[in-house]
């Protein structure tokens, strides 16, 4: 069967590979689930792996199948699987357990292992192929009402995990009633963070670089949130007018803004960082003022990346709520479909150079 793969460590090596079709026998204890892939989203991670910034092939292979944002339909299940059946729409989680105590208790997204296993990212093949098999423990059912937007679940779990962790941390305050939030970044993650915070009832100001009008600011305003272009207003100036911010969610990919967020976060506030920034950018920061503000203001900063099954399941519930409160909104994020694995060059051209793209994804097969 066909698959879109790279040769890790070789920049620009994305190509069409061939794999044997997987079998339920590949998973022990009768827990295997065979899934026909329907859609796979691509993002900056796929772009960075193709640029040879990170990623490793599974043992016995000289290539890595890409794709960690999956959506598919169950074709066959093993005899020990009770909670899934053929015809179910599903999304698979990305990280697989290692050997730490966190892996043992199901929080494999919190592993302390130096070596980690992530489908489509590191040491495990991904989902940009025709079929995959995995253990039922890592496969989450998606209701038919979300079949048109289910490919957004994996990126949504990054937001879901960050905000659930933020609320969990803030239990330290005994009484915490956040009212104002800021989202830095108006790409896919920033848009989904804006949605999630609005579903929680907060007043949200979302920052993006591009000046309005364009699709992203329109989508933000459809949620009843405020859009601010950083070309016109600095984050610290906007915080004076629209803050103080009880929650801030950073999703820009531009690390200096993380430090600016630390400056303007409100007292007793929590800052969630979701950007994965390689490189070695250096900036000058008012470190004394930031440190003093965090200490005297009881502020917290936490990172979010990847997610375990818990956040996929809660993400399904939140996406269903979003479809009810803001019908059709999630579907508008799916801006750039590319049909067929054989069109991998066009897929990556859109990912790298596509104008006004929110979510680029591959239509692998029809439902």
Image: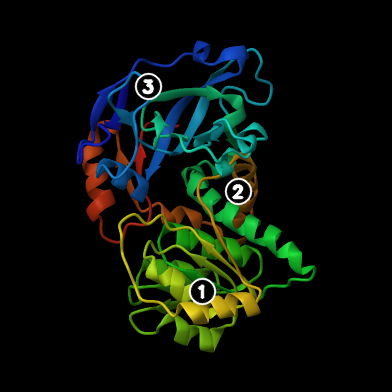
- The dot on residue 173 is none
- The dot on residue 315 is 2
The crowding category of the residue bearing disc 2, from other C-alpha atoms within 10 Å (few below 14, some 14 to 19, many at least 20), is many
Classify residue 82 by image quadrant. top right
Which quadrant of the figure contains the C terminus? top left
Q: Which residue is mark 1?
A: 262
Residue found 57% across the figure and 80% down from its top: 292
How much space separates mark 3 and mark 1, taking CA atoms? 42 Å
Of badges 2 and 3, the one in the foreground is 3
Are the two marked residues, 2 and 3, in contact with CB atoms closer than 8 angstroms? no
**The one of 333 and 270 positioned closer to us in this rendering:** 270
The crowding category of the residue bearing disc 1, from other C-alpha atoms within 10 Å (few below 14, some 14 to 19, many at least 20), is many
Which quadrant of the figure contains the N terminus? top left
Question: Quick check: 239 above or below 223?
Answer: below
**The one of 321 and 99 positioned closer to us in this rendering:** 99
**Coordinates of residue 118 in the picture (x, y in percent):** 45, 35
The crowding category of the residue bearing disc 3, from other C-alpha atoms within 10 Å (few below 14, some 14 to 19, many at least 20), is few
Q: Earlier in the sequence, mark 2 or mark 3?
A: 3
- The dot on residue 59 is 3
């Amino acid at each position: 069967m066909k698959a879109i793969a790279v040769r890790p460590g070789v920049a620009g090596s994305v190509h069409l590979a061939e794999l044997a079709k997987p079998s339920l026998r590949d998973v022990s204890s009768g827990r295997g689930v065979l899934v026909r892939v329907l859609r796979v989203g691509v993002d900056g991670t796929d772009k960075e792996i193709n640029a040879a910034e990170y990623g490793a092939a599974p043992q016995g292979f000289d290539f890595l199948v890409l794709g960690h944002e999956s959506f598919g339909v169950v074709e066959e299940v093993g005899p020990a699987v009770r909670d899934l059946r053929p015809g179910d729409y599903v999304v698979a989680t990305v990280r697989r357990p290692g050997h730490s105590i966190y892996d043992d208790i199901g929080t494999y997204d919190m592993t302390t292992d130096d070596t980690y296993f992530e489908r489509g990212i590191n040491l495990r093949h991904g989902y940009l192929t025709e079929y995959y098999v995995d253990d039922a423990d890592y496969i989450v059912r998606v209701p038919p009402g979300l079949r048109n937007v289910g490919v957004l679940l994996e990126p949504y779990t990054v937001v879901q995990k960050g905000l659930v962790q933020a609320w969990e941390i803030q239990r330290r305050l005994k009484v915490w009633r956040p009212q104002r939030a800021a989202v830095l970044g108006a790409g896919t993650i920033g848009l989904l963070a804006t949605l999630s915070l609005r579903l929680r009832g907060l007043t949200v100001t979302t920052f993006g670089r591009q000046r309005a009008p364009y699709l992203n600011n329109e989508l933000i305003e459809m949620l009843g949130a405020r859009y601010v272009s950083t070309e016109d207003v600095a984050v610290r100036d906007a915080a004076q007018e629209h803050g103080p911010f009880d929650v801030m969610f950073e999703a820009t990919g531009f690390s200096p803004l993380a430090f600016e967020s630390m400056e303007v976060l409100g007292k007793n506030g929590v800052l969630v960082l979701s950007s994965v920034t390689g490189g070695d950018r250096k900036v000058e920061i008012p470190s004394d003022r930031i440190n003093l503000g965090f200490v005297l203001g009881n502020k917290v900063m936490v990172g979010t990346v990847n997610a375990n099954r818990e956040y996929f399941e809660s993400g399904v519930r939140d996406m269903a709520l979003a479809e009810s409160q803001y019908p059709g909104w999630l579907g508008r994020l799916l801006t750039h479909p590319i049909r067929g694995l054989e069109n991998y060059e066009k897929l990556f051209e859109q990912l790298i150079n596509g104008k006004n793209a929110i979510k680029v994804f591959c239509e692998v097969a029809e439902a």
